[in-house]
Amino acid sequence: MRPALRTAGKLALLGVGAIAVSALIVQVWYFSQVLWWSSHNPQSTAFMRHRLERLRAKRPQARLEQYWVPYARISDSLKRAVIAAEDAKFLEHEGFDWEAIEKAMAKNERRGRVVAGASTISQQLAKNLFLSSSRSWLRKGEEAAITWMIEMTMSKRRILELYLNFAEWGETAFGAEAAARQHFGSTASALDDEQALWLAAILPSPRRWRGGTTTPYLQSRIDAIRIGFPHARIP
């Protein structure tokens, strides 16, 4: 083999090795953060920081509202509504609802575009804590890896507690407490069934809605969630 080719081969191997080491370091960092957050509360999330950056590009003084509340001080109605809306098999799966994924893929294939998703609460938490809102196969791979870490190290109760405290629920509202204050002048612990159903229904596009207002489309979502609401099991 020519010296130039040998040198190029060595450089290529070194490059692949450096990429592999870098990827491993990133995964170790993710795992260390997941372990820490299994018993400590985050101050913010990657998604919140990304959202604030975009808001401040237009309004430099913009601020987000997020108030940590422990699991016991979040309305059971909201817990049930969110599980019914976002992840009916939350207590059964280990991070991924494969049946829902298959159905979503089939529906998207029929429509010829992405019209349905199947992200579990654990997957959404992984995205909110660590990742941006961009879409790529690399990001989906990272999301899957972090979801596995979360499921392996956290209880379902802790996963739901973190999710409910950092889900986006409005232009500047993150978490159940901020959502209750902004939309209903209430608290996370005092949300009733109807308020909880409304909050669960707006999760796919929370910045479009305020204060319990509804439309025929949103009402149809509320009615669909209401069907599963009484049967939703919470940790």
Image (cartoon, rainbow, N blue to C red):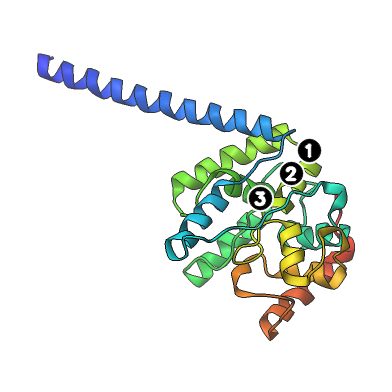
Location of residue 127 in the rendering, given as x and y in whole percent from the top left corner: 58, 48
Q: Which residue sits at x=36%, y=22%?
A: 17
Query: Quadrant of residue 199 in the image?
Result: bottom right
Which tag, 3 or 1, sits closer to the chain's start? 3
Residue designated by label 3: 98
Mark 3 and mark 1 residues within 8 Å of each other at the beta carbon: no
Query: What amino acid type should be assigned to the residue bearing mark 2?
Result: Ile
Give percent across and percent down for residue 133.
50, 55
> Which quarter shows the N terminus?
top left
- Lateral position of residue 89 relative to residue 1, left or right: right
Q: Secondary structure at mark 2?
A: helix
Q: From the viewer's perspective, is residue 222 above or below residue 14?
A: below
Residue drawn at x 69%, y 85% as measured from the top left: 216
Q: Closest to the observer: 90 or 43?
A: 43
Residue 43, percent from left and from top: 64, 43
Q: Which residue is mark 2?
A: 159
Instruction: Establish if 149 lies above or below 80.
Output: above
| Three-letter code, disc 3 | Trp
Would you call the spot at circle 1 few (<14 residues within 10 Å), some (14-19), or many (20 or more)? some
Query: Residue visible at 63% across and 48% down?
Result: 123
